[in-house]
Image (cartoon, grey):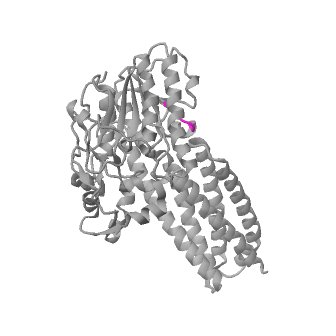
Amino acid sequence: MPALDIVFVILTVQILLGGFDNLWHHELSEGLPGRVSARTEIGLHAARELIYAVVFLIFGWIEPHGPWAIALGIVLVGEILITLADFLEEDRTRKLPPLERILHTVLAINYGVFLALLIPILWGWAQLPGALTPVDRGLWSLFFSLAGTGVLIWGIRDALAWVTLNRRARGRIATGPVVASGRTVLVTGATGFLGQDLVHRLQLRGDHLIILSRDTLKAAAMFGKNVSVVDDLQRLAAETQIDAIINLAGANVADMPWWDGRKQVLLDSRLTPTAAVIALVHRLHNKPQVLVNASAVGAYGNRGETALPEHASRPLGEFTADLCRVWENEANRAAAAGVRVCCLRFGLIFGRDGSAFPKLALGRRFGVTPQFGCGRQWMSWVHKLDALRAIEFALDQPRMNGPVNVVAPTQVRHRQVMRSIAGTGLLLPIPAILLKTVLGEMADLFLASQRVRPDALQAAGFRFNFPEIEGACQNLLARHATPHEHLDHVHDTPSV
C-alpha cells in the first residue's frame, strides 16, 4: 500500500473516533454547546474543526508543493497546540468520564502516528516548485469531501455557539454592586437546565450559594469563586448556616425510553440526593427555613378533561405519578424538623436551550411541526422565566406550603401549543400508536392529558410574565428576544 494511502487510513480512524467523541460526549452526554462554562472549550473545538475541514479538502483534491506544503505542516502543528489547550481547559472545567479520557488518549496517539508518517511526504512535496496541484484520488477524494463538508458545518455551528455563549456570559455579569443578603442557600441540581440560571439569579440577589455537585470542577467553572461547591453533604458541618434549600436534582425523564433499568435511574437520581438533604436538615443545629423541592405535573397522571388544582386526587400505578409521589414524600420528611416544604409541580418548561422547546420547534424551519396523537390532550407548560420566578417566590413567601403547581394560568390543548410554535407552517400528526410502539410507556409524556391549574401561586399573588402560549412562543422564537431569562430578575416579595 502506498505511504499516502496508509496516512489516509490512519486519518480515517481519526475522523471516525473524533466524530464519535463529538457526538456522544460533547453533544449528548455533556451538552457543551449549551453551557456557558464550556464556551472556551467550544471555541477551541470550533478552531480545530475548521482546521480539519481545510485539511480534509486539501487531501481530497490538492497536493501542496513548496511553501504550501510547509504551510500545511504548520497548520497541523497548530492543531496540536489547540488540542493541548483543550486538554488544559477540560481539566479545569469538568470531570471527564473514563471513556472520554481513554478516547482522547487514543486520538492523541493516533494523531502522532499520522504526523510521523505524513512529515516525510510533506518534506518531499516541499522540495517541489511552489504550487497547489489539483489531483483526483478517486474514492478518497469523495470521502474527504464528505468529511470536510461535515466537519466544516460542525465547526461553523460550534463557532456560532461560542459567540452565543460569550454573549450569555456577558449578560450574566451584574451591572452594579450586589448587596449581600446575609442568606445562604443550598442548591442541588445547580448545573442542570433550571439550576444554572437560578444560581445566577440568586447571586444577583446577594445570596451566598452552596452547590451540591458530583462534578465539582464543572460547578466551579460555571459559577465562579463566589460559591461553595461540595460533592457530599456530609462534608458540611452541623454548625453550617443554611437558610434555605432548593432541591432540583434528578435525571431527565425524556432522555431515553423507560426500561426497568432507566426507571430505577430516574427514581434513584431523585431519592438519593433528597435523602441526603433530609439527613442534613436533621443534622444541622440551625434548621433551614424552607425546602423548595422540584416535582412535576406527572403527579396527576393522565386525567382527560378533569381540572387539576393542587388538592386534586392522584392515581396509583402510573409511573410518573408514582415517581412524583415517592419523591415528594421523601422531601416532606423535612417538615418533622420544622422546615416549611414546598413541592413545585412543574409543567413542561419552555426555554431557549436545554429544554423540549427547541426540539419541538425544530420542524418550524422546514414548514412542518409535529402534533402528537389527536392533539386534543391538555398540555400544561410554563415559560422558563416564570418557572425561575416561581422558585424564588416559593423561597420568599412564608405562606407558601405543600404542593404548588407551576404552570401557565391559561390551559391549552396540545394542538394549540404546536400551532403557536408552528406559526404558518403545517402540523404533521404523529399517530399515538406509533409513539407507543417506539417509546413504550414514555409516550405518556406526549399523550397524557393534564389540565393543571396554578391555584396556589395565583392565590398568593404571583403574576406570570407569560400567561399565554402565543406570547411565550413569540418570546422564545425571537432571534434577539429580551429580557434574558437570567437577568429579568423580579422581586415579587422581599426576601425572608
Q: Quadrant of residue 315?
A: top left
Residue 489 in the magenta stretch? The answer is: no
Residue farthest to the right, as pictured: 1
Main SS category, magenta section: loop
Q: Is residue 154 above or below residue 220?
A: below
Q: Quadrant of the C terminus?
A: top left
**Residue situated in front as seen by the camera: 58 or 429:** 429
Residue at the (61%, 62%) spot, across then down: 20
Quarter of the image where one finds residue 16: bottom right
Which x, y percent locates residue 317?
A: 44, 44
Res. 131 in view:
no
168 to the left or right of 458: right
When the figure is inspected, residue 305 is found, relative to residue 389, above or below; the finding is below
Give x and y (percent) for residue 328: 42, 32
**Furthest residue toward front:** 316
Q: How many marks?
A: 0
Q: Residue at x 36, y 66 (%)?
A: 363
Taking the image as shown, residue 286 lies to the left or right of residue 126, namely left
Residues in magenta, as a range: 211-215
Front-lying residue, 310 or 62: 310
Q: Position of residue 56 (x, y in %)?
A: 60, 73
Looking at the rendered image, the quarter that the N terminus falls into is: bottom right
Q: Residue 348, percent across and down?
A: 35, 48
Q: Is residue 435 left or right of residue 400?
A: right
- Does the magenta segment cover residue 214? yes
Which residue sits at x=51%, y=34%? 271
